[in-house]
Image: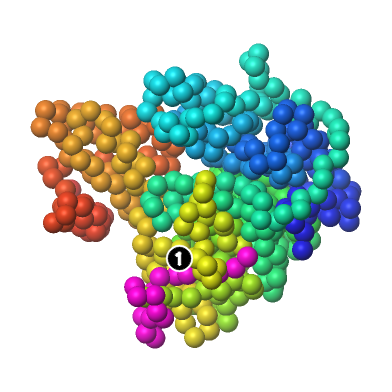
């Protein structure tokens, strides 16, 4: 088994040098040999820019070829890649910059202005003007910016400079336990933390997926790359999987219902990995089956797929849709219906080869038959704990509690029941209520705030905020002020779709907000029982 994801690229370049590896909808294409050469150049370029093994590189880039080369180049140079949502706000990016201690940021024309503002915020924090963790700021230098295809400031470098020469050969990775990537997720705390993914974990999950029979991806497939590469689903399940299988990737930066179908037809895409909302967006289109003609398989992940959407989609198109269960901390795939004895059941499938799944009750024992329990997993694909100290990782026996609740049938199929964590999943992306609550809580006039998720036909879930005004606040204008603050500090998918200003929130005897009662209010609202 290879020690690094970048080694999979080297093997592909040796075996199929002239075969197409990546095609962009903008018109660029590269073969496996060309991609290998570019990644090699970038990996050496990092060293020429002063980075050494273990340094962090933040990647704020959309779905374009340079994301792949800077990510794989970082792994080859034994740096630590920190992929971040390019639609993040400057405040969000600054927090990640400080937390990760990144020495370099690679960005593209769509995000460069926001990244520059984030760097300025970090400089203000170091000067004591903003409230950041002093320990995290200690010793933090100004990160070097590498900008793709945009006008440079004097202190910045262009991507072409990063990939300009081969230089010295890099030694191969010796330790698979070395840190490869930091991916920000909530863990079990409800606040974004970086999952520490080793080279071993990333490669292990790629091999576990490759062992599934029938395979998700083969060398003959053309795979749609519309899932964002900064997300672990696109990063390792899609990009890592096609590197392993030598499939061709059609890279798409942003989903558009009609436009994406055009790409599928034009490029003869055969495998389509997506998040569940994509299927809902496509269902109203009358000629859906014809436009999905080249597709042999749909793969759905990152959130639950509603049963009615699944049934209607399969009935209309005849295309099998396989879903699974995964987490960032598992690199990410844990189960798949391709591993099920009964793939038509309403489960998220059975565990991949090499992964164990079990349920435990509150006392740590196996629950009684037909009773739900906390989902625990074990396998080489698991993370090494949360940055920076590896806290809350797998236990001494290798088991890790996911924070989810499920049922396991006699055949090993997993059925999701509930989440212990209060994550809201919007279009497949995690939103942590406490992060939104922190922003709203700083708005003048807000006395108390609670954020929940509610069902949404298009995005799966939507964010809703409940706000109690302070005595002196202008309640009529408070919702507007809250929305404005969220627009300034939070990425679009994190922003509340509704802000309800209320006189009080339901509290427990210990003063904790009873969010279950708020969700019940939203259910009544959805049924038309409330205005």
Q: 353 above or below 204? A: below
- Would you say residue 315 sits in the magenta stretch? no
Q: Residue 354: which quarter of the image?
A: bottom right
* x then y, percent, for residue 493: 43, 42
At 53% across and 84% down in the image, what residue appears?
A: 411
Tell me which secondary structure the magenta stretch mostly adopts.
Answer: loop
Q: In this view, does 154 lie to the left or right of 286?
A: right
Segment colored magenta: 362-380
Which residue does the numbered mark 1 point to in the structure image? 401
Front-lying residue, 143 or 223: 143
* x then y, percent, for residue 408: 46, 78
- Would you say residue 363 sits in the magenta stretch? yes
Q: How crowded is mark 1: few (under 14 residues within 10 Å), some or many (20 or more)?
A: many
At 41% across and 56% down in the image, what residue appears?
A: 188
Q: Residue 3: which quarter of the image?
A: bottom right
Q: Is residue 191 left or right of residue 7?
A: left
In which quadrant is the N terminus drawn?
Answer: bottom right
Q: What element carries label 1?
A: strand
Q: Can residue 164 be seen in this view?
A: yes
């Amino acid at each position: 088994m290879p020690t690094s994801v970048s080694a999979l690229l080297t093997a592909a370049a040796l075996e199929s040098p002239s075969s197409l590896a990546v095609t962009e909808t903008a018109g660029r294409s590269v073969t496996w040999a060309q991609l290998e050469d570019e990644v090699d150049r970038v990996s050496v370029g990092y060293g020429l820019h002063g980075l050494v093994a273990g340094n962090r590189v933040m990647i704020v880039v959309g779905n374009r070829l340079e994301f792949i080369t800077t990510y794989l180049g970082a792994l080859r140079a034994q740096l630590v890649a920190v992929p971040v949502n390019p639609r993040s706000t400057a405040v969000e990016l600054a927090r990640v910059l400080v937390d990760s201690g990144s020495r370099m940021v690679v960005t593209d024309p769509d995000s460069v202005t926001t990244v520059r503002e984030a760097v300025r915020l970090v400089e203000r924090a170091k000067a004591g003007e903003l409230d950041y963790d002093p320990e995290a700021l200690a010793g933090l230098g100004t990160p070097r910016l590498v900008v793709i295809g945009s006008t440079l400031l004097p202190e910045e470098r262009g991507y072409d400079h990063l990939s300009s020469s081969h230089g010295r050969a890099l030694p191969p990775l010796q330790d698979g336990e070395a840190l490869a990537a930091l991916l920000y997720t909530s863990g079990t705390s409800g606040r974004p933390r970086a999952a520490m993914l080793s080279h071993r974990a990333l490669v292990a999950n790629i091999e576990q997926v490759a062992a599934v029979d029938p395979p998700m991806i083969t060398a003959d497939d053309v795979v749609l790359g519309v899932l964002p590469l900064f997300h672990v689903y696109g990063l390792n399940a899609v990009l890592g999987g096609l590197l392993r299988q030598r499939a061709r990737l059609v890279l798409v930066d942003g989903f558009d219902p009609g436009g994406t179908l055009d790409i599928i037809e034009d490029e003869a895409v055969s495998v389509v990995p997506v998040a569940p909302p994509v299927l809902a967006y496509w269902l109203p289109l009358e000629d859906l089956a014809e436009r999905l003609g080249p597709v042999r398989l749909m793969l759905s992940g990152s959130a639950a797929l509603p049963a009615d959407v699944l049934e209607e989609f399969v009935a209309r198109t005849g295309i099998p849709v396989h879903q699974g269960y995964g987490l960032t901390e598992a690199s990410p795939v844990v189960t798949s219906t391709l591993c099920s004895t009964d793939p038509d059941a309403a489960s998220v499938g059975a565990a991949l080869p090499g992964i164990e799944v079990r349920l435990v009750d509150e006392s740590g024992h196996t629950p009684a038959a037909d009773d739900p329990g906390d989902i625990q997993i074990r396998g080489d694909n698991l993370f090494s704990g949360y940055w920076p100290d590896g806290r809350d990782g797998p236990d001494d026996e290798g088991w890790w509690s996911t924070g989810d609740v499920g049922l396991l049938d006699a055949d090993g199929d997993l059925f999701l029941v509930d989440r212990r964590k209060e994550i809201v999943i919007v279009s497949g992306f995690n939103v942590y209520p406490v992060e939104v609550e922190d922003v709203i809580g700083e708005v003048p006039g807000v006395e108390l705030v609670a954020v929940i998720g509610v069902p949404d036909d298009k995005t799966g879930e939507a964010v809703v905020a409940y706000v109690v005004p302070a005595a002196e606040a202008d309640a009529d204008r408070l919702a507007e002020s809250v929305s404005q603050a969220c627009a300034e500090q939070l990425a679009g998918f994190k922003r509340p779709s509704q802000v309800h200003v209320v006189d009080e929130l339901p509290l427990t005897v210990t003063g904790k907000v009873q969010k279950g009662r708020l969700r019940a209010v939203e259910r009544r609202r959805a049924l038309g029982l409330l205005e």
